[in-house]
Image (cartoon, rainbow, N blue to C red):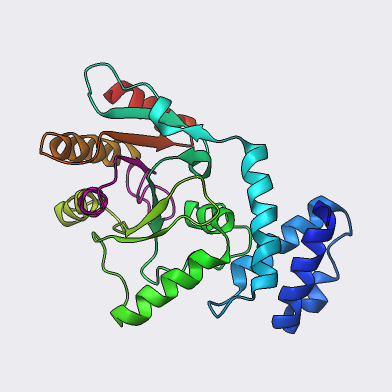
Amino acid sequence: MNRLEQIRFLNEYLLGEMPVYRTQAESFPADEQSQRRLLRSLMNVRPPKPLDEDFLSVQDALLAAEREKKGIVDAAALPECPGHPGIALWQGDITRLKADAIVNAANSALLGCFVPCHGCIDNAIHSAAGLQLRDACSRLMQQQGHPEPAGQAKITKGYNLPARYVLHTVGPIIQGHVTQWDRDLLAACYRSCLELAAAQGLASVAFCCISTGEFHFHNQEAAEIAVQTVERFLQTPTSIRKVILNVFKDCDAKIYADLL
């Protein structure tokens, strides 16, 4: 199959599972870019359930090719920030990072974002990893039996991501002013991810800017908490040798550059 044939196969498979979306799908133009957007939309709304091997084979081939086209960034090669041993700053798409683990800022359902093509990091990570990630998260949540509390962390495989694992954490949602409780929960997110990564013997972890997007934590204060928490953790005996503070927006890049 060429790329467009792969996309069409996957779209038809998902529409067979979810015929309620077929009328909407017919409004998408037939070109490759539009059909790929339809595929991401269908993957975003698909509920977790068993995955067919034929579907996974084509999905994984498509996502692997897209991963290579975007370009993989080796976390081990990123330079440390002067005066901050073990910490690197990198601006870009976290789904390109080849690290032992990347961190996903999740919601309490821990199933990824169900809004088609939404711009949040949760959607980006699940879309690049493939539908296996939502299925794995669903199994974790079924075992747990309740929503994921803020400040904790779960780990899954990375599937089609360059990263070996994904660490999922739920940050505090800010409504009004940031409280000390919010600050403590955000610090707990960073600490829980690092502790879980260390318990798995991982050496590199890449963090997104937890809670600063849809959850409205003030960017400057969130960055200060992130740097302080990571630096304190790295002062203790641990398998973790490098923590990458990943930013996407220019405003966050400036904040972290000033701090580091």
Q: Which residue lies furthest to the left in this view?
A: 236
Q: Residue at x 44, y 70 (%)?
A: 136
Q: Position of residue 21 (x, y in %)?
A: 74, 77
Which image quadrant is residue 53 in? bottom right
In the rendered image, the quadrant that contains the N terminus is bottom right
Instruction: Report the span colored magenta.
Output: 194-218
Which image quadrant is residue 9 in? bottom right
Q: Residue furthest top?
A: 82
- 39 over 87 or under it: above or below: below
Residue 204 belongs to the span the image colors magenta: yes
Q: Residue at x 36, y 69 (%)?
A: 108
Q: Where is residue 16 in the image (x, y as percent from the top left)?
A: 75, 81
Left of 19 or right of it: where is 139?
left
Q: Is residue 54 visible in the rendered structure shown here?
A: yes
The residue nearer to you, when weighing 159 against 126, is 159
Left of 34 or right of it: where is 158?
left
Which image quadrant is residue 7 in? bottom right
- 65 over 156 or under it: above or below: above
Left of 9 or right of it: where is 100?
left
The residue nearer to you, when weighing 120 against 75, is 75
Report the number of numbered marks.
Answer: 0
Left of 11 or right of it: where is 63?
left
Q: Is residue 113 visible in the rendered structure shown here?
A: no
Q: Which residue is drawn at 50% across and 68% down?
A: 134
Specify the principal SS of the magenta part: loop
The residue nearer to you, when weighing 88 against 164, is 164
The residue nearer to you, when weighing 95 against 240, is 240
Q: Position of residue 48 (x, y in %)?
A: 53, 77
